[in-house]
């Protein structure tokens, strides 16, 4: 079921009310980003924290794609300016900061 998910990534489902859910594979480091954490908070309010199986985000797919684009742009620019992460020399591979409950 999860064999197509690369190491360091998680599969999630995204879909708003009345919309078919779509599957996305996102880097685990997204789970520490404030924008993504807000989406997780909405999911927790909608479904409770103990979702079984794939995490489902109850926002519209286009909204999720927009947020993902913001996070990706911020991540690519933060390779040059580290504002709140204090990892050094991690330009060549994705170091996953503390992930809390979500372990790949």
Image (tube, grey):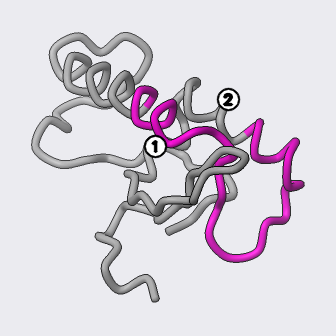
Q: Residue furthest front?
A: 18
Q: Nearer the viewer, residue 96 or 20?
A: 20
Q: Residue at x 57, y 59 (%)?
A: 20
Within the image, what quadrant is residue 5 found in? bottom left
Instruction: Decide: is 11 above or below 33.
Output: below
CA distance for labels 1 and 2 = 18 Å
Q: Which residue is mark 1?
A: 97
- Residue 56 falls inside the magenta stretch: yes
Boundaries of the magenta span: 41-67
Q: Secondary structure at mark 2?
A: helix
Describe residue 68's horizontal placement relative to residue 14 as left or right. Answer: left
Describe residue 82's horizontal placement relative to residue 31 as left or right. Answer: left
Q: Picture coordinates of residue 97 (x, y %)? A: 46, 43
Tally of numbered tags: 2
Instruction: Decide: is 64 above or below 43.
Output: above
Describe residue 97's horizontal placement relative to residue 3 as left or right. Answer: right
Q: Picture coordinates of residue 87 (x, y %)? A: 32, 31
Q: Which residue is mark 2?
A: 38
Q: Residue at x 47, y 65 (%)?
A: 11
Q: Residues within 10 Å of mark 1 (few under 14, many from 20)?
A: some
Q: Residue at x 20, y 25 (%)?
A: 76
Q: Residues within 10 Å of mark 2 (few under 14, many from 20)?
A: few
Q: Picture coordinates of residue 30 (x, y %)? A: 46, 41
Q: Picture coordinates of residue 100 (x, y %)? A: 65, 51
Q: Which mark is residue 83?
A: none
Within the image, what quadrant is residue 41 found in? top right
Q: Residue at x 77, y 37 (%)?
A: 42
């Amino acid at each position: 079921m999860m064999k197509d998910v690369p190491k360091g990534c998680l599969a999630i489902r995204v879909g708003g009310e009345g919309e078919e859910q779509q599957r996305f594979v996102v880097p685990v480091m997204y789970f520490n980003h404030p924008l993504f954490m807000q989406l997780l908070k909405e999911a927790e309010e909608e479904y409770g924290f103990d979702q079984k199986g794939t995490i489902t985000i109850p926002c519209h797919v286009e909204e999720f794609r927009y947020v993902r684009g913001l996070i990706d742009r911020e991540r690519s620019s933060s390779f040059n300016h580290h504002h709140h992460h204090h990892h050094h020399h991690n330009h060549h591979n994705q170091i996953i900061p503390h992930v809390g409950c979500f372990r790949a």
